[in-house]
Image (tube, helix red, strand yellow):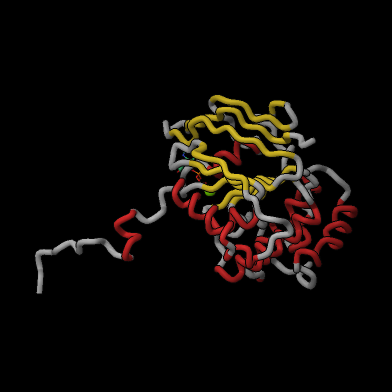
Amino acid sequence: MTKVRLKLEEVHKTYPDGLVALDGVSLSVEEGEFVTIIGPSGCGKSTLFNLIAGLDLPGRGKILLDGREIAGRTGLVGYMPQKDLLLPWRTVLENLILGPELAGEPRERARREALEMLPWFGLEGFTHSYPATLSGGMRQRAAFLRTVLCHKDVMLLDEPFGALDALTRAQMQVWLLDLWERLRRTVLFVTHDIDEALLLSDRVYVLSARPGRVRSEMAVRLARPRRLEMVTTATFMQMKKTLLETMELAAPAALAANGKPDRTPQTGAVG
Ligand SMILES: Nc1ncnc2c1ncn2[C@@H]1O[C@H](COP(=O)(O)OP(=O)(O)O)[C@@H](O)[C@H]1O
Ligand SMILES: [Mg+2]
């Protein structure tokens, strides 16, 4: 029997300046599930995560963790915000133990655990380096490990690979798939990349442009463990097409037929 861990019911958010960011978002994430929210930039994805993490309050609606209302309560879910927020004056190791440290846990135990996990995250040899000396991919892995070390079995990951180049991004996707197979935590993930959403997830929610609301939900029926090559399969392509259509990103019929508009617009200056 699967168990619902996180449930959002008709969540609304209007910012004090009157901007309506979310207009009734309902979704759920089951135990051990990898669920992705995809939607255009500015549709309220990070806002939604701030609400789930308890950093801001919804105007209306419910946010339930294991059936209990958690709106406004921090420290219950692991949260990797969109910006990595590594403290520049702290070494990698000192950054990693920040969560346990703030929670008042013994530093020594946190250090030991961080050191054990470092190799999994490709950070061995960088224990005492400062964030500024790391590559983009390494910074993301450090921020991610810091989230993992907070020991929350429901994790929110906000566009963790958004700022990386395509190759690093693909490497990180493969790495995350492998890690998730081992940890099996419950993950709610945000991206605006359709391939990434399909490759990683069990289910995908598509949000509309602002104000965000759920336009559709898709179960990703691809076998696990997933491999990068799966993006070339017919099943994958079909799902991608459906998502593109839902997001209204598919080319209009006239464009799709021959790759260019059927009539070239004439400009005044012909010559
Ligand atoms: N603190 C805030 N005050 C007012 N408006 C905000 C605030 N934070 C975000 N917004 C606005 O809310 C909308 C949704 O933002 P955000 O949740 O960051 O979108 P996304 O993560 O999907 O790109 C945007 O129009 C953004 O400018
Ligand atoms: Mg965002």
Q: Quadrant of the C terminus?
A: bottom left
Residue at 69% over, 32% down: 73
Q: Which quarter of the rendered picture does the N terminus lie within?
A: top right
- Is 34 placed left or right of 49 in the picture? right
Residue 27 visible here: yes
Q: Nearer the viewer, residue 30 or 70?
A: 30
Q: Is residue 80 left or right of residue 234?
A: right
Where 12 sits versus 201, above or below?
A: above
**Residue 238: % across, % down:** 53, 55
| Numbered label tally | 0
- The residue at 73%/35% (across/down) is 5
| Residue 133 in picture, x, y percent from top left | 66, 71
Q: Residue 161 placed where, x, y %?
A: 60, 60
Q: Residue at horizontal 66%, vertical 61%?
A: 140
Residue 104 in which image quadrant: top right
User: Which residue is drawn at the image coordinates 59% and 46% (left, top)?
Assistant: 204
Q: Is residue 37 left or right of residue 17?
A: right
